[in-house]
Amino acid sequence: MSVGKRGALFVFEGCDRCGKTTQSRLLAEFLKSKGIPTLSMNFPERESSTGQVINSYLTNSNDLPDEVIHLMFSANRWEYMNKIRKELLAGTTLIVDRYSYSGVAYTAAKGLDFDWCYAPERGLIKPDAVFYLKTASDNLLSRGKYGEERYEKLEFQQKVAEVFNRICEQESSYWHQIDANQSVAEIHTQISGIAEKLQQQVDGQPLNKLA
């Protein structure tokens, strides 16, 4: 059975303040300029019912056990899975700021079991590419507003980076490690080049799931 023209799923990952938001915006603008229908999302999506609980946790107004908040983050992604599938199959390319891997990295960095953290993500739609913006954690301190939310503590971010590095190694077939210490323009050139190539390759390809 042939699959119609579908959109690509591009995900941005990395530690806090590594430049994901800027780069995902630039990629969206680039793809739109090429006439590609493009939609931007970010997780957690704080508008939904799970998103509101997550938001109160992240802004330190609500405390929850680590296991509970981890499953809330995962549920937040599952909540949007039908929308994501529908958009991709309708030919829209999605650019997502944070996905399952952030969920795994941030909880595993607290000391919870890696496989337990990954389990609720299995079955979610697998990205066509993950752009991992990698930078030394101490370089992040100089970037604006660092330290305002619960997870923005240097030592913790270093642990998060270790988990991201592990996932990057395991998933190297579709993870693209980008040096986040380059200029904004250099990073964008690298990412847009990869994205444009993949955009043409996903035509007729089925949607895969995280396994």
Image (cartoon, rainbow, N blue to C red):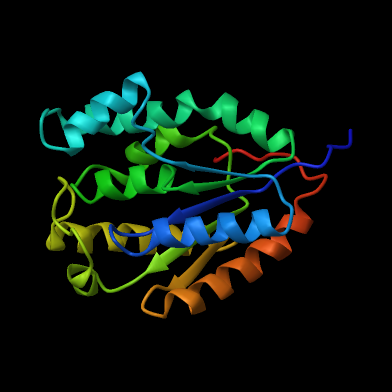
Q: Is residue 99 above or below residue 179?
A: above
Quick one: quadrant of the C terminus? Answer: top right
The residue at the point 23 percent across, 42 percent down is: 112
Residue 137 lies in what quarter of the image?
Answer: bottom left
The residue located at (83%, 37%) in the rendering is 3
Residue 179: image x %, image y %?
Answer: 42, 76
- Report the residue that reaches farthest toward the front: 33
Query: Where 179 falls versus 38 (above or below)?
Result: below
Given residues 169 and 19, the one toward you in this image is: 19
Work out whether 65 lies above or below 29.
above
Q: Is residue 46 left or right of residue 35?
A: left
Q: Quadrant of the N terminus?
A: top right
| 181 vs 65: above or below | below
Front in this rendered view, residue 109 or 204: 204
What's the residue at 44%, 44% (across, down)?
99
x and y percentages locating residue 161 in the rendered image: 29, 62
Query: Quick one: 69 or 180, which is closer to the camera?
Result: 180
Provide residue 182's location: percent of width, then percent of height: 41, 80
Left or right of 147? Residue 196 is: right
Locate residue 202 relative to residue 185 in the image: left or right: right
Quadrant of residue 164 within the rendered picture: bottom left
